[in-house]
Amino acid sequence: MDNKGNVTLEIGVIIIILLMVMGIVLSLNEISTEKIVSQSENEHIQTLLEESVVNLINNPGTPPNWEVNKKGTPGLAIVNEEGQVIPNSVSYAKLLAMGSDYNKFVTKTLFNSKIKTSIELIPKESSISSVKIGNDESSNNIHSVNRMVKCDFFKKYVLKDFQNDGKCNRNHDQNSHSCDYFKVFKGNLRAFDYYLLIDEDEKYDLNYFMGSTRLVKDKSWEPVRYDEIYLNNKIEFYDDTSAIIFIHFDKPNAKAVLVQLPKRFDENNINYDYFRTNDCEFILKAWY
């Protein structure tokens, strides 16, 4: 082979090497671009989730009572009896309403059907189970935002919380007793069941008795041996259509609540923890 042939061969080898280098550079550039795009998308999703969580747990939704009519923009924050929004809170009733049509309220309304999500509420230091709504997780690349919130579960059915100061008709010192009262009509007993619900750790340390404005002499104190006490058969009307019933505990700030439950209320949920304010972990997850 003459010099001319050698030069041609060398040029060919150089061209091949250059093409290989260019291919590697283009491939690396494409990978780098994909990583940048992927990182940007991940950051966008994470920001979107964080903003959504802040809005959900601080906003009660619009219009008011959207969870009843199942129309409007959802929010989960609790509104107290004075009409004030409790920040960083989750209403159990609103969470269930959101879960009843998750695709409508969350997938479409909040995220424009661009991502799949799920929401979980996990009670802390409580005997009750977590609640999860939304899609089943179907990806390894899951984004998540966690917040600690106050959650109310069935607190709307509470008539009296004995950890709050109440009124007493027997001059009991509230430094050593917990007392309060409620009014009940005979017709109420056809529609509702009344219970005293006691914290599991409290029940053997408490005594109680029920009385009314018509009762002259105190009844005997009874030991609390169960964490739920059915009251319908203990209410005395004295032939009147209504009665004012007082309940007394021999301990201050008793961990007990008086609840008024609609008939056919799920017996599995008749538990003190469901009717107090809980500390819960709120988790929003998202994926493509």
Image (cartoon, rainbow, N blue to C red):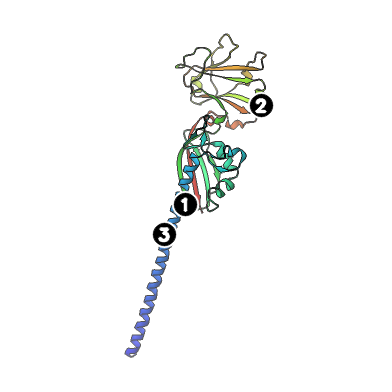
Distance between the alpha carbons at the discs numbered 2 and 1: 48 Å
Residue 284 higher or lower than 198, as above or below: below
Labels 3 and 2: the sequence-earlier one: 3
Q: Is residue 135 visible?
A: no
Quarter of the image where one finds residue 228: top right
User: Given the image, on which type of amino acid does mark 3 rest?
Assistant: Ile
Few, some or many C-alpha atoms within 10 Å of disc 2 (few <14, some 14-19, many ≥20)?
Answer: few
SS at mark 3 in the image: helix
Q: Residue furthest top?
A: 217
User: Given the image, on which type of amino acid does mark 1 rest?
Assistant: Ile
Q: Residue furthest bottom?
A: 2
Q: Are marks 2 and 1 in contact (CB under 8 Å)?
A: no
Few, some or many C-alpha atoms within 10 Å of disc 3 (few <14, some 14-19, many ≥20)?
Answer: few
SS at mark 1 in the image: helix
Quickly name the residue at label 2: 191
The residue positioned 55% from the left and 46% from the top of the image is 106
Q: Position of residue 128 (x, y in %)?
A: 52, 34
Q: Is residue 48 visible?
A: yes
Q: Which residue occupies the foreground of this view, 197 or 66?
A: 66
Quickly name the residue at label 1: 45
Q: Which residue occupies the foreground of this view, 229 or 204?
A: 229
User: Given the image, on which type of amino acid does mark 2 rest?
Assistant: Ala
Quickly name the residue at label 3: 36
Labels 2 and 1: the sequence-earlier one: 1
